[in-house]
Amino acid sequence: LYNRNMCLYEKYLSDIDALNDETIAEMKKYHEETKSLLKYYRMDIPQDTSDGLDAFNKKFTDHILGPDWHDFIFSTYDEFKDDYENYGKSEECLKKEFEEKVLVEFYAKMDDVFRDGFGTSSQSANNAFEGIAAIATNFFKG
């Protein structure tokens, strides 16, 4: 399930300019299959992990795959871009940085969900991920 979610977000963010209603519909179908798997394996997955995935899906995935996907992703990008507007970077460079930043934040959020749910949090793991979490923006906080 973790890998399926990672693949979805990696594909989504690989080129936000290439997104259109057709690709969103394909990704939504893929996501629905992932949610079905989650329901199927619910007994094998700790409740905290299931709850974390459900919360994440309601807060973010439903928005990026919903009818207002375009407004959601590009308003988020515009907020990101406003922070870097004065640095003189090209639009292409900014989009690449945005895609990378959102993926890092996604990985950190999923790591939190799965480590907490499976009880695998350790001090060394926490220390390693503190650096990643430090660069997270408000996109995946919550």
Image (spheres, helix red, strand yellow):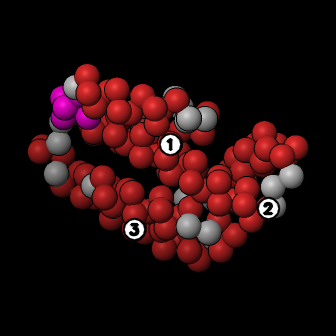
Where residue 105 is drawn, which disc sits there?
1
In the image, residue 26 above or below residue 56? below
From the top left corner, tell me how far across and down residue 27 is, in percent: 48, 68
For numbered disc 2, what is the local secondary structure? helix
Which amino acid type is marked by label 2? Glu
Alpha carbon distance from label 3 to label 2: 30 Å
Which amino acid type is marked by label 3? Tyr
Callout 1: few (<14), some (14-19), or many (20+) C-alpha neighbours within 10 Å? many
Q: What segment carries the magenta color?
A: 115-121
Q: Residue at x 42, y 46 (%)?
A: 107
For numbered disc 3, what is the local secondary structure? helix
Point out the tag, 3 or 2, that comes first from the N-terminus: 3
In the image, residue 99 above or below residue 106? below
Q: Tell me if residue 66 can be seen.
A: no
Tell whether position 117 is magenta: yes
Q: Which residue is mark 2?
A: 91
Residue 9 as seen in the image, left or right of residue 15: left
